[in-house]
Amino acid sequence: MYVVVMGCGRVGSSLAGALTRIGHEVAVIDRDPTSFHRLGPDFTGRQVVGMGFDRDVLIEAGIEKADALAAVSSGDNSNIISARVARETFGVERVVARIYDAKRAAVYERLGIPTVATVPWTTDRFLHTLIHDNELTKWRDPSGSVAVARLDIGEGWVGKGVTALESATKARVAFIIRFGTGLLPDRKTVLQADDEVWIAAVDGMVAEAVALASNPPPED
């Protein structure tokens, strides 16, 4: 899936990184070129300087081939204009806008534009709206309550214990593939480079875990 992210603040950079890590193509728009440092050196997507509601800027970012757009800048007006231009001018079906004003959010929801307020786990909510958990999970129990998924951890997690990862992601590390061999971690297990980490999480929380694990660990 090709996704355009408008805004490269904390949420935008986290969302772009999470999408890239799970195999999607991403273009990020921001009017401040210095904001792209938040993406980190491993980001392989496009970086476009400009206003996210400008048609030419959106075209440069690849909106004409985009499957989805997330407008997550710091301005409600900019976000909603960008979302409406993407949908009404370029025919992008999956759009979501970050809205600070709850009253405005209700109006835009009635216009058919999903909104996400500035609440905890914003990145997860955007991921869930754009791609849904079923594109991340490899197995679900028959009731659909628990999902198992592969987690691509950021470099900052190497050397950290699995308990730290579990605490940050609110998920259980079910098993790890290390050097081609599976192992069941315990409280003393430390994450190593090239570990293939598999988690078990409550339904609806997989996208959150992916997003959090793609970022550096929280400071102690």
Image (tube, helix red, strand yellow):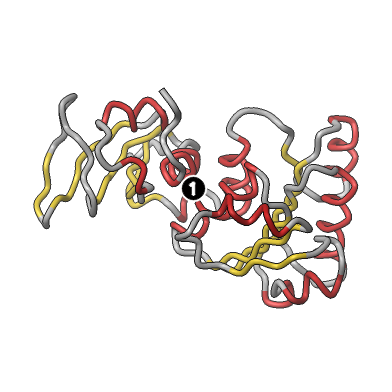
Give the left or right position of residue 84, taking residue 29 as reference: right
Which residue does the image show at 44% across and 58% down from the upper left? 22
Q: In this view of the protein, which residue sits in the foreground, 80 or 33? A: 33
Q: In this view of the protein, which residue sits in the foreground, 106 or 11? A: 11
Can you identify the residue that label 1 sits on? 133
**What percent of the width, then of the height, locates residue 44?**
50, 67
Which residue does the image show at 61% across and 28% down from the upper left? 120
Q: In this view of the protein, which residue sits in the foreground, 122 or 51? A: 51
Crowding around mark 1 (Cα neighbors within 10 Å: few <14, some 14 to 19, many 20+) is many
Q: Is 46 located above or below residue 96 in the figure?
A: below
**What percent of the width, then of the height, locates residue 143?**
38, 36
Q: Quadrant of the C terminus?
A: top left
The residue sitting at the front extreme is 34
Q: Disc count in the image?
A: 1
Q: Is 62 located above or below residue 36 in the figure?
A: below
User: In the rendered image, which quarter is residue 39 located in?
Assistant: bottom right
**What percent of the width, then of the height, locates residue 89?**
86, 71
The residue sitting at the left extreme is 181
Which residue does the image show at 80% across and 39% down from the upper left? 99
**What percent of the width, then of the height, locates residue 151?**
35, 47
Q: Disc 1 on helix, strand or loop?
A: helix
Give the left or right position of residue 218, taking residue 76 as reference: left
Residue type beneath disc 1: Asp
Which residue does the image show at 36% across and 31% down from the upper left? 171
Q: Is 108 located above or below residue 67 in the figure?
A: above
Give the left or right position of residue 73, taking residue 175 as reference: right
User: In the rendered image, which quarter is residue 52 located in?
Assistant: bottom right
Q: Quadrant of the N terminus?
A: bottom right
